[in-house]
Structures are given as C-alpha cells and as structure tokens.
C-alpha cells in the first residue's frame, strides 16, 4: 500500500522518515497543518542562501540588462540634438528651434523611468512618466550605447 505522501507525487517519501509539523509547533495556528516534511528539514532556506541569491542578481544586473533612467535620458537627449541639427540644416539657425530643443531637454530631464521589460535580445520596452503623462519607449542596445525608438516599430 502506498503512503499518503506517495499518492501526492512525492517519490520515495514514507511516513517512517517524516514527522507531522504540528508536533513541533508551539503556535496553535500551525497545528492545523497536515503537511509532512523530513525530520530536521527547515521551513525556510538558510539566510546565507538569500544573501547569495541577492548578490548574484545584483551582479548580473550590473553586467548589462535593462537601461537605467540615465541611459534613457541620454538616448532621448541624443534624439533631441539630432532633430535640432536636422532642423538647422533645413532652415538654418533659428531661435524658435533652439527654444523648442531647450524645452524638450527640460522634459527629458524631468522624465522618470517606471520600469523596463525585455523585448528581444538587445531591446527593452520601457515605461516612462513625464510632465505630459506616461508613455512607452523601446530602447535598443547599439554599438555606441542605448538608442531610443518608437515602441511600435
């Protein structure tokens, strides 16, 4: 006959090497549990395991990953500068274009990054918040750093 643990899909588990949790708990709320676990097993992993996992995730994030708020700002500032340069080539130096570019730079500096999610091998969709509300930007990792593009392209 199979034990209740084997019926739940726990291969090799027998009631001989398991002890009910409620017999070790001093908290009366825990005595209602019928789950079985091996004698001496911890309910939570060692604190060292959490430290190692946190350290690993931080080191991986530093190696690449999604763009930071300063990366998004730098990419958007490059776009503003490129647009100003194109306008100057067409219409010459113009106070109106300079004023528009200065306003766009202020908007870029006021922008806050909400978060990014992967959208391919070297691309991220990033949610941003600015003076005009929230929006989404697609960030691409290029050879010279991050590039901003329209999320629909």
Image (cartoon, rainbow, N blue to C red):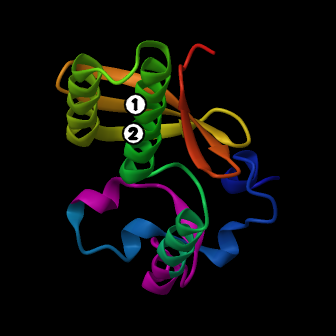
Q: Secondary structure at mark 2?
A: helix
Kindly identify the residue that appears in the image at 67 percent across and 77 percent down. Answer: 17
Drawn side of residue 10 relative to residue 133, left or right = right
Kindly identify the residue that appears in the image at 80 percent across and 59 percent down. Answer: 11
For the C terminus, which image quadrant?
Answer: top right
Check if residue 115 falls in the magenta segment.
Answer: no
Q: Secondary structure at mark 1?
A: helix
Q: Give whichever of 77, 24 is nearer the camera.
A: 77
Q: How far from the left and from the top, in percent, is residue 53?
A: 54, 73
Label of residue 77 in the image: 2
Would you name the residue on which mark 1 appears? 80
Q: Give whichever of 103, 88 is nearer the camera.
A: 88
Q: Which residues are magenta?
A: 29-51
Q: Residue furthest front?
A: 92
Q: How far from the left and from the top, in percent, is residue 141?
A: 64, 45
Drawn side of residue 24 relative to residue 13, left or right = left
């Amino acid at each position: 006959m199979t034990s209740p643990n084997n019926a739940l899909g726990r291969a090799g588990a027998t009631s001989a090497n398991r002890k009910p949790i409620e017999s070790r708990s001093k908290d009366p709320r825990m005595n209602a549990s019928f789950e079985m676990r091996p004698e001496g097993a911890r309910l939570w992993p060692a604190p060292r395991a959490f430290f190692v996992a946190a350290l690993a995730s931080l080191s991986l994030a530093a190696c690449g990953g999604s763009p930071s708020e300063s990366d998004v700002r730098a990419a958007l500032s490059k776009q503003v500068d490129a647009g100003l340069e194109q306008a100057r080539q067409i219409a010459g130096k113009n106070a109106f274009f300079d004023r528009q570019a200065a306003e766009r730079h202020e908007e870029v500096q006021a922008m806050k990054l909400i978060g990014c999610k992967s959208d391919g091998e070297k691309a991220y969709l990033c949610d941003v918040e600015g003076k005009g509300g929230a929006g989404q930007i697609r960030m691409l990792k290029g050879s010279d750093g991050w590039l901003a593009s329209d999320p629909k392209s």
